[in-house]
Image (spheres, rainbow, N blue to C red):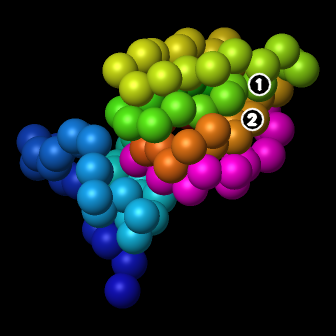
Amino acid sequence: MAMSHLAAGQTTNVLPLGSALANARTTALFKSEQLEVIQLVLPAGKSFPPHKVAGEITIQCLEGSVEVTIEDTPQTLKANQLMYVAGGVQHGLTALEDASALVTIVLRK
């Protein structure tokens, strides 16, 4: 059964998953006409392949660490750090250790 997205005004926790991280899955928290927010879960060594989206992105690492590669330049993003990625820029992620992150995407038509 698919999880329903948050409704306007509804709340959810976005704290680190801790011991639940090993069994957690990536979840789209909500998607509107202009914005999408995803709780991304990546086990150590797993990747989200290089890609581009039209809108700006923020990646907030909640726990663990990920290597974010922006146009062939890698940078480590650790727990409690936030990164901005400009729209239209190629980027990918690899988990250096079990990690979760909050990803916000500005959607453009």
Q: Mark 1 and mark 2: span between their CA atoms?
A: 5 Å
Q: What is the quadrant of residue 77 in the picture?
A: top right
Q: Residue at x 47, y 58 (%)?
A: 26
Q: Residue at x 27, y 42 (%)?
A: 16
x and y percent of residue 104 in the render? 46, 31
Counting residues from the start of the chain, the first of labels 1 and 2 encountered is: 1
20 vs 47: above or below: below
The residue under label 1 is 69
Q: Is residue 56 visible?
A: no
x and y percent of residue 72 in the render? 89, 20
Tell me where the magenta segment starts and ends, as one range: 38-54
Specify whether residue 76 is painted magenta: no
The residue under label 2 is 92
75 vs 37: above or below: above
42 vs 102: above or below: below
- The residue lying furthest to the bottom in this view is 1
* Amino acid marked by disc 1: Thr
Instruction: Judge left or right: residue 14 versus residue 39.
Output: left
Which one is in front, 95 or 69? 95
Crowding at mark 1 (Cα within 10 Å: few <14, some 14-19, many 20+): some
